[in-house]
Image: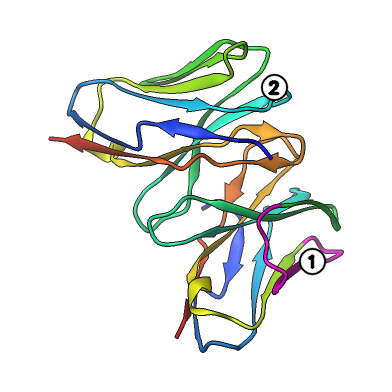
Amino acid sequence: GENVEQHPSTLSVQEGDSAVIKCTYSDSASNYFPWYKQELGKRPQLIIDIRSNVGEKKDQRIAVTLNKTAKHFSLHITETQPEDSAVYFCAPNTGNQFYFGTGTSLTVIP
Amino acid sequence: DSGVTQTPKHLITATGQRVTLRCSPRSGDLSVYWYQQSLDQGLQFLIQYYNGEERAKGNILERFSAQQFPDLHSELNLSSLELGDSALYFCASSVVQDSPLHFGNGTRLTVT
């Protein structure tokens, strides 16, 4: 199956700074690239996604960039706020399956 | 509210027992996925159904089985339970197979 890696596994930033999380995948057939946010004790929720025919997508303070040649995509959060503190998962889709990355625990320090 | 309903919310049972977890997908969603999340761990893909048919299997143990019924709700059956099966089990649904997943609130299983 797909080999998915996320880096870093933990990330602490000061409020107002930017955060970047990178996800690498192995299957060149992957065509859909979502990011999910999971707050403590809650369900994962989609925050942004991108398809293989697009290089970048932005939604307010959140953006995702895709490099299909290098097989990685990244989550960018600008002007971080304490409520951004959560675990973030990438989940590239190949065919019928979503393989979730190991997660990145983001802490935003007020 | 994601529109995905999972029952029960909590389940406490003993080793060796069997339990059934239930999931009702969001209205209109044909795909149902089951994931297992152990403490401080990631989401392990178990199995996927699409419109009643099994489409993909992940790291699902032989002691576990699932099915999707004609009304599209799904059940995950866990048998001969072990302490290590204690986890949060999520169900997710999507319209088609490469569209956003909508997660239920999960069933927390505790095996004692």
Does residue B27 appear anywhere in the picture?
no
First to last magenta residue range: B58-72
Residue in view at x 55 percent, y 15 percent: A66
Look at the image and tell me in which quarter the C terminus of chain A lies.
top left
Residue A50 visible in this rendered orientation of the protein: yes
Instruction: Check disc 2 and report the residue beneath it.
Output: A28
Q: Is residue B93 magenta?
A: no
Image coordinates of residue A36 in percent, x first then y, are 48, 38
Q: CA distance from mark 2 to mark 1?
A: 30 Å
Residue A43 horizontal side relative to residue B74, left or right: left
Residue type (three-letter) at the residue carrying disc 2: Ser
Q: Is residue B68 magenta?
A: yes
Q: Up-down: is A98 above or below A61? A: below
Quadrant containing the N terminus of chain A in the rendered view: top right
Could you tell me residue A46's position as x and y percent?
51, 38
Numbered mark located on residue B18 in the image: none
Query: Hey, what amino acid is under mark 1?
Result: Gln
At 57% from the left edge and 53% from the top edge, which residue is drawn?
Answer: B44
Q: Secondary structure at mark 2?
A: loop
Residue on which disc 1 sits: B67
Helix, strand or loop at label 1? It is strand
